[in-house]
Amino acid sequence: MLKKINLDHNKKLLIPELIKIVGIDNVIQDENELDFFSSDIFYESSIKASLVISPKSSEQTASSINLITSYGIPVIPRGGGMSYTGGYTPMIDGSVIIDLRKLNNIININKEDMYVTVECGVTWKTLYEELKKHGLRTPYFGPFSGIHATVGGALSQNSVFYGSSLYGTAAESVLSLDVALQDGTILKTGSNSNKINPSPFFRTYGPDLTGLFLGDTGALGFKVKATLKLIPFPKEQRFSSFDFSSDLEMFETMGEITRKQLAQECYGFDPFLMGLRMQFEGLKKDLKSLSALTKSQKNIFSGVKEVIKVASAGRSFMEGVGYAMHITVEGKNDKEVSSSIEQIKSIAEKNNGKEIANSLPKLVRANPFLPTNRLLGPKGERWVPIHVILPHSKVKGILKEIDSYFNANKDIIEKNKIKWGYLTSTIGTSAILLEPTFFWEDSHYQIHKRYIEKSHYNKLNTFPENLAARNAMKKIREDMSSIFMNNGGTHLQVGKMYKYKENRQETAWNLLVSIKKILDPNNLINPGSLGLK
């Protein structure tokens, strides 16, 4: 039952009770900290959280949610903070953010039944490194930002990258969840919801309740534990890179590779973004990655051999490159991966692809979770992406629409000195992600100053606040979101930006609203997310 009292009075009563649950050191009221937790990479919220708490267990989290909402106060989950769609930005005055990063234990690595259970505040980097010690890995094993991104955040927003060309999104590697609900109860899903002898080894026992909470952007509950599939850590890896003179040739190649399930990662960059990426990488950073590359090989001799290849290629291999496609192939033995690489080369050559040095995918995999220095451009420019997921058959059409849009808005883009390019990556056999990425001169947020290495940040330019360019970027992203919707696109990280509600058929939307009312009758769990207001 809601306590019918005014917001300020609620907060005064709430704080002592929260301190009893999580401890005084885990209740944050400092204004500077509230600013940090209330803003994401793109959105600096005009509404600030009134409190941030950092529970250390599932039970503390569940009790806190129930207590906070009993006062009629909205509560919002936050993981590593890598959102750029307002995933955790408050919409209502007085909201409380729950920082879940202290729920960071790896609970059980089950080598016999091949699953791992973790608390949802653990980072993908931590999980990857621990599993590797045991010769294991999850199929999907994290985004580029996995040094900060948490398992729970990626499952709430859904996510792609490492392993996604073969294994799909983060959601597809999940077996079971523990979800803290608005009323303080903890829901277990899949085979772990058995009354007798529960175990989180199987997902689809009856209706898929696990799937209900994946990609929900934290609107339905707080993920506190997750069980993920395990696979043996691949024994063999190979890498390939190709240069294409046209984007359509690159996309045709990527589609055929992924339909034949030949690669764990298949991704590409347009000429602008590929060139920009090379500006980020200095010699010192490369040397660190080369050291990791040596360690990633089967033995010291093969490691040194790979380092020599990468070092010899240097950076000149990217000069004059058009559309660059990069491939990672894994397998049980040399014969398997060599066969896949040969097929990939044949497909690329058929589409006029020219093989180039494979330094980039080698370095990426040697150290998959680098510091998040690319939250800003190479000269300190602000950065934000937008993306769409489409079937392969629709890529050609949407590329034309995107080009037409930017040509029509050339004056706005030039006036605000906005630069853009795109990256792309295949997802399973049926889908491809297209992610236009933008750079412009603007002031930095706290998240940039905290999450970028200090030694790197100190070398960057800083810029005055540029609201005109920022508002232009908001309009561009809004317009592009409409283009994506009209082409039947879908999205990860729906948050509070993408047009999820606007593009739901009535029956599907009404069902979601009904589920929300059952789980959160007063709409106090991350209000506004998914368009649920």
Image: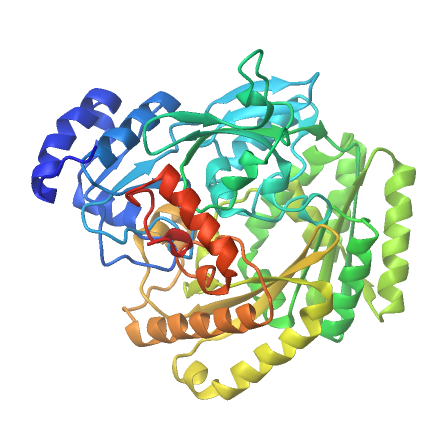
Q: Residue 321 lies in what quarter of the image?
A: bottom right
Indicate the position of residue 98 as horizontal and vertical percent values: 31, 36
Question: Where in the figure is residue 94, as x and y percent of width and height?
Answer: 18, 46
Residue 434 falls in which quadrant of the image? Answer: bottom right
Q: Could one spot residue 453 in this view of the protein?
A: no
Residue plotted at (24% across, 49% down): 35
Relative to 227, is 441 above or below?
Answer: below
Quarter of the picture containing the C terminus is bottom left
What scheme was used to colour the molecule? rainbow
Residue at the spot 86% in from the left edge and 42% down from the top edge: 337
The answer to whether 356 is drawn above or below residue 264 in the figure is below
**If the image is split into quadrants, where does the N terminus sit?**
top left
- Which residue is at the front of the view, 403 or 199? 199
Point out the residue furthest to the top here.
197
**Point 78% across, 67% down: residue:** 252
Vertical position of residue 505 compared to residue 109: above or below:
below
Where does the image place residue 96, in percent across and percent down from the top left? 25, 41
Instruction: Quadrant for residue 478, please give it.
Output: bottom left
Name the spot of residue 417 as percent of width and height, x first: 42, 79
**Residue placed most toward the observer, 281 or 333:** 333
The residue positioned 58% from the left and 77% from the top of the image is 402
Instruction: Name the one closer to the observer, 528 or 128.
Output: 528
